[in-house]
Amino acid sequence: MDSLSLPRLMVSAPHKSSGKTTVMLGLAGYLTRQGERVTCFKKGPDYIDPMWHALASGRESYNLDPWLMGQDGCRDSFIRNGRNGTLALIEGNHGLHDGLSLDGSDSSAGVAALLEAPVLLVIDARKMNRGAAAIVMGMQAMQPQVTIAGVILNRVRSRRHGEKQKLAIETFCRVPVLGSIPEDSQLAIAERHLGLTTVGETAEAASFIDEAADQVAHYCDMPAIRALFALAPPVRSYPDKHVSIRSEARVRIGVFRDAAFCFYYPDNLRALEENGAELVYIDSMHDRSIPDVHGLYLGGGFPESFFFELGSNRELMLEVSRRVESDMPLYAECGGLIWLSRSGTYGGKTFFLAGILPFDIGFQPRPAGHGYLNLRSSTQSPWFEHGAEVRAHEFHYSSPLSGSGGCDWQFDVIRGRGVTGQHDGIMYRNLFASYAHLHAQGNPQWAKRFTDLAAEWKARNPLEK
């Protein structure tokens, strides 16, 4: 076992919507400008924040979610992905101490404690003065205890307002205030029904990150913040375990990846590669045929925003249907399930879709399913063992309006919504489609099963593309 120096820092807040994502992007952008190789992480299951992280740092961003991945999975992913950078920057989710478990082990504080990462706390300074110190003291005292190494005051009304809070925090909490960002700094990312807008949907995304970096550098003590990374002790690392070993490619898997389908955990894509897959990317709106592949992966995203363009590409939909009928393995999550359905009704208009699944999809103003999923496999299939329990995440405003009867289901829903409220994971031939987003770290057999199915299809169809 070796010790690995991995300078790291978590950016968190007492509660959500405090401005931590903007500060995170500003820090990542600024430090990258300074020549650092910043590897970003996001605590939690979401996809959109990591897209912004990747734009700010120029490097892939990874999720850390104890509920989905387990603590060992989080630690392994952090070391494996962080070791190739000079700095690791982690964004918490919700409030520092928010989580499902009473002991806080699955909170952002739990992740900071697991990784022994110091915390930079971003406080929404509005509607407080010296009481800001009480907020920091509560964050310090709450279990699991973490090292709050610095504070940034955000949305400060005036210099006097900021000075009152700074004096109180540094006097009573013994924590330095390393930045004071004015309320009128005009840094905000538009929110939508799944958190932040995606990078692809936000005009001038790179300009926003540049401005965030400028603002953070102007209003914060960047040398002092940079020094916080060094407070983290070395981590214990098993060298072989935390190095990616990609098998020689034995199959090719086509991955729908474009503006409509952009939700993929990087660890999932790498797990496929490590199990012998060469990934071939497909544009669902512009590619008219399937390339030379042996399996298909349709991830999540916002297909409803592109129903007209998707529905207009009938050639691709017919080609995928033909591949499904040939028993080519196809794995679809959320947005992929929608694309495979008969139709989608959104914004008062109905659009014809691939027609492979017997669903007519509708959308509602409030989430149909939102949060963590507990699933239990009720049948044996090539994808999952009978009796297997799977942890996943869902966030969808859509659900079938009709057509969910008579389907073959993989899972009974123990917690969450899934497709029907009782079932999730529809199976047809070697197709599996679900509202569940699972993570390969918490489901280590998933990638091997997928690539094995693709290899079997390849052996049965030697003359097929």
Image (spheres, helix red, strand yellow):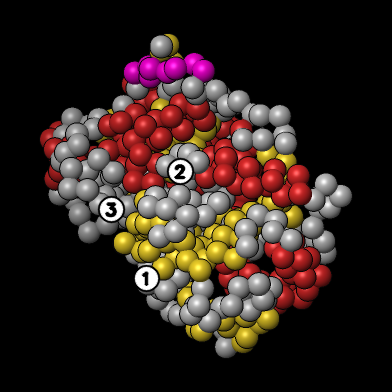
What's under tag 1, amino acid-wise?
Answer: Gln
Q: Which of marks 1 and 3 is nearer the N terminus?
A: 3
Q: Which residue is drawn at 63% across and 69% down?
A: 340
Q: Where is residue 310 in the image (x, y as percent from the top left)?
A: 71, 71
What's under tag 2, amino acid-wise?
Answer: Asn
The residue under label 2 is 443
Q: Can residue 276 be seen in this view?
A: yes
Q: Earlier in the sequence, mark 1 or mark 2?
A: 1
The residue under label 3 is 15
Name the image quarter holding residue 245.
top right
Q: Is residue 212 visible?
A: no
Q: Position of residue 149 (x, y in %)?
A: 28, 30
* Real-space Cα separation, disc 2 to disc 3, in angstroms: 30 Å
In the displayed structure, 43 sits above or below 300; it is above
* Real-space Cα separation, disc 1 to disc 2, in angstroms: 22 Å
* Element type at mark 1: loop
* Element type at mark 2: loop
The residue under label 1 is 422
314 displayed left or right of 245: right
What's under tag 3, amino acid-wise?
Answer: His
Q: Which residue is drawn at 72% across and 36% down?
A: 250
Q: Which of marks 2 and 3 is nearer the N terminus?
A: 3
Q: Is the magenta stretch mostly helix, strand or loop?
A: loop
376 displayed left or right of 176: right
